[in-house]
Amino acid sequence: MLKLRRAKKAKGELRVPSDKSISHRAVIFSAIAEGESHIKEWLASEDTKATLDIVKRLGVEVKRKGKNLRVIGRGYQFREPLEVLDAKNSGTTARLMMGVLATQDFFSVITGDESLRQRPMLRVVEPLRQMGAFLDGREKGNKLPVCIRGGKLRGISFFNRKASAQVKSALLLAGLRAEGYTEVLEPVLSRDHTERMLRAFGVEIIQLEGQEGHVVKLTGGQSLKATEIFCPADPSSASFFIALACLLEGSELVLKDVLVNPTRDGFFRKLRQMGADIRYENLRELSGEPVADVYVRDSGRLKGVEVLPKEVPSMIDEIPILAVVMALAEGKSVVRGAQELRVKESDRIRAVVENLRSMGAKVHELEDGFEIEGVENLKGATIRTYKDHRIAMAFSIAGLVAEGETVIDEPECVAISYPNFYKDLDYIIKG
């Protein structure tokens, strides 16, 4: 357990760990490319190490030196694994690797930890079956472990109803080895790191926007050419420190090298809408992604705000920490269209509502979100993390702005995405 008390302010400059989504994709895309790719500032977390371990078990040679990797790609010519592939707690690993494994004419099995084995997989399994791969598992393929025998695939047109970047990415990775076009239509644009990175590896992609939504498609038979990929700082990890600076009087922070992709910076834009003083400085592009130093300082009490369903994909991982900010904002805040949070590492809607209530917040739970009436102060409480890193980090910030003592029940779960979170938190509140 970890005990926290109210901090005075947050000060200084910090480079949070690199983006998890990009770090996963950098390893996978380098593995399927032809030649030697170089990955800089790679995130070494429990989730990304699961991806790295799986590609190694498929015969990919990786040389690691600190935060940099050299990956010798196999051009989709992988070795049949001798044992079950373990994605651990990482949904990105499991779902994207299903897309890769569906292209292989050998047998493989992918599983995960207790939490991941409860998360829905049919959203990826069904379209891969439509492409011609054989997949089966618990609950007719909806739950891990899932076995895969792939091979000759055909391109399909798929409506990605939940606007899931993991589903889209899995199908595009399979589509690179499918006959004809593979097309994914989304009602709202999901994270587009896969599209951007595939272009960096030399793949031709068509993207269209129409009345029915966003379309991305590619033709099969294309090869990825080895390249260099820079992994910028994770906006989800940066969000906790930015929230703290907004909530503690006299705070001023600079977060270096942060990814500010429009499909990922919804949290920052929403805080600005609430009245926060947040600015992008030194804006530039690295490996096809927009990157900036994010400057934030406290600007007094923020105002309540509404998050619309179409805005959710750009801030899905930040909604727990946004809820903490909303609890201390003036007036009413609402989040709708976030039902995907119920099938993350925990039921994040339930976890947010229960923990905020224990701290004295006024919260009404909805099936797809919640309503929050802002209060002047939160009070310390014992926080149930449900072994969910986002819940642990969000409510650690709540503990640093609350009156009295807050206890985090399983703080070690932050290692899933941010092993040094508490060390960095200590640095900025003592800076």
Image: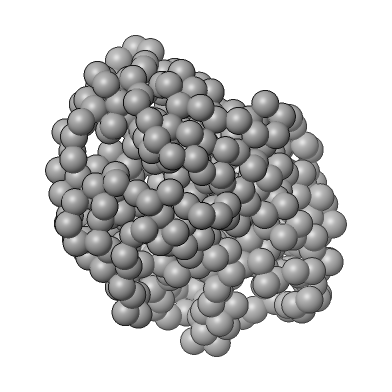
Residue 314 vertical position relative to residue 260 in the rendered view, above or below:
above
- Asked whether 92 or 10 is in front, the reply is 92
Where's the N terminus, which quadrant?
bottom right
**In this rendering, position of residue 168 left or right of residue 389:** left
How has the structure been colored for display? one colour
Residue 309 vertical position relative to residue 420 in the rendered view, above or below:
above
**In this rendering, position of residue 203 left or right of residue 96:** left
- Asked whether 78 or 282 is in front, the reply is 78
Residue in the image at 31% along x and 73% along y: 63
Residue in the image at 61% along x and 67% along y: 414
Measured as percent of width and height from the top left, residue 65 is found at 32, 79
Measured as percent of width and height from the top left, residue 149 is found at 48, 34
**In this rendering, position of residue 246 left or right of residue 357:** left
Q: Residue furthest top?
A: 211
Residue 272 vertical position relative to residue 249 in the rendered view, above or below:
above
Question: In terms of image quadrants, where is residue 183?
Answer: top left
Measured as percent of width and height from the top left, residue 244 is found at 56, 67
Residue 28 seen: yes
Residue in the image at 28% along x and 38% along y: 195
**In this rendering, position of residue 354 left or right of residue 235:** right
Residue 164 seen: no
- Asked whether 367 or 413 is in front, the reply is 413
Residue 61 vertical position relative to residue 315 in the rendered view, above or below:
below
Measured as percent of width and height from the top left, residue 270 is found at 48, 45
Question: In terms of image quadrants, where is residue 409?
Answer: bottom right
Residue in the image at 71% along x and 42% along y: 118
- Asked whether 338 or 242 is in front, the reply is 338
Give the tally of numbered discs.
0
